[in-house]
Image: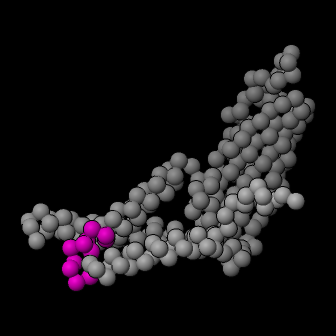
């Protein structure tokens, strides 16, 4: 083995060991939540709560109608902050829609939603806040649903770590003569088996003739 090969093997071993340790927690999380997502009937979580809220906002916050029937100068910030502070609403603002008759304000988060419907004529509103259980929360975290940009970066980073751990492990085994042949053989077998399962057991998109009479 040349000096360069020894250096590559050493770096690959270092990367494989320490990247595995650094990413252990997050990779374990995505592995476990992969199971909870794939088998929702195994982990059905009934611990959810729905709370009804009501109140009113300042009429001036709702703006005014223009000649085309569109609502203008709606104070979205004041309305959103009022709902947050009054009812301790969590989650990010997902939608704010204002028309002639009402304003709809929606907040979303992992396993969480709050939807307010504000009457444009009176300023009164009703809102339903829904909190789901632990399993729906971690499933949403796995999918990156309503989790924000920071968690999206965590998902990207975890994927990158999985790639680096896999590649460093592959490079490392190339330098272990006693394990190299068997390791590469299992790599090929695993890839072929995965493809065959996909090809023969995963339903494919139906053709047009499948619906013809």
Q: Say if residue 7 shows up in the picture.
A: yes
What secondary structure characterizes most of the magenta part?
helix
Say which of 134 and 154 sits in front. 154
What x and y, as percent, mark residue 134? 65, 69
What x and y, as percent, mark residue 84? 69, 46
- Quick check: 16 above or below 67? below
Q: Quadrant of the N terminus?
A: bottom left
Q: Is residue 173 magenta?
A: yes
Say which of 61 and 147 sits in front. 147
Q: Going 46% across and 66% down the picture, which residue do you hit?
A: 26
Q: Quadrant of the C terminus?
A: bottom right
Q: Going 80% across and 33% down the picture, which residue do you hit?
A: 98
Q: Is residue 195 magenta?
A: no
- Quick check: 56 above or below 111? above
- Quick check: 26 above or below 83? below
Q: Is residue 193 left or right of residue 174?
A: right
- Quick check: 99 above or below 138? above
Q: Going 77% across and 36% down the picture, which residue do you hit?
A: 97
Total labels: the figure holds 0
Tell me where residue 13 sits by quadrant.
Answer: bottom left
Q: Going 82% across and 59% down the picture, which residue do you hit?
A: 211
What x and y, as percent, mark residue 86? 73, 46
Tell me where residue 178 sits by quadrant.
Answer: bottom left
Determine the residue located farthest toward the left in the rendered image. Answer: 3
Q: Say if residue 19 shows up in the picture.
A: no
Say which of 168 and 179 sits in front. 179
* Protein image colouring: one colour
| Span highlighted in magenta in the image | 169-179
What x and y, as percent, mark residue 55? 84, 44
Q: Is residue 139 left or right of residue 149?
A: right
């Amino acid at each position: 083995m040349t000096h360069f090969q020894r250096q590559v093997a050493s770096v690959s071993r270092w990367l494989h060991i320490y990247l595995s340790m650094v990413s252990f927690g997050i990779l374990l999380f995505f592995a476990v939540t992969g199971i909870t997502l794939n088998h929702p009937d195994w982990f059905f979580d009934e611990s959810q709560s729905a709370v009804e809220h009501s109140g009113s906002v300042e009429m001036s916050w709702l703006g005014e109608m223009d000649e085309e029937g569109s609502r203008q100068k709606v104070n979205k910030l004041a309305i959103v902050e009022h709902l947050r502070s009054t009812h301790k609403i969590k989650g990010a603002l997902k939608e704010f829609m204002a028309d002639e008759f009402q304003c709809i304000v929606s907040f979303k988060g992992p396993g969480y939603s709050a939807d307010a419907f504000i009457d444009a004529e009176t300023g009164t509103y009703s809102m339903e806040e829904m909190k789901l259980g632990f399993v729906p929360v971690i499933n949403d975290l796995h999918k990156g649903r309503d989790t924000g940009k920071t968690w999206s970066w965590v998902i990207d980073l975890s994927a990158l770590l999985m790639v680096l751990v896999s590649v460093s492990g592959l490079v490392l085994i190339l330098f272990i003569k006693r394990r190299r042949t068997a390791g590469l053989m299992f790599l090929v077998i695993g890839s072929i088996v995965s493809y065959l399962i996909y090809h023969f057991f995963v339903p494919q998109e139906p053709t047009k003739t499948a619906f013809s009479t």
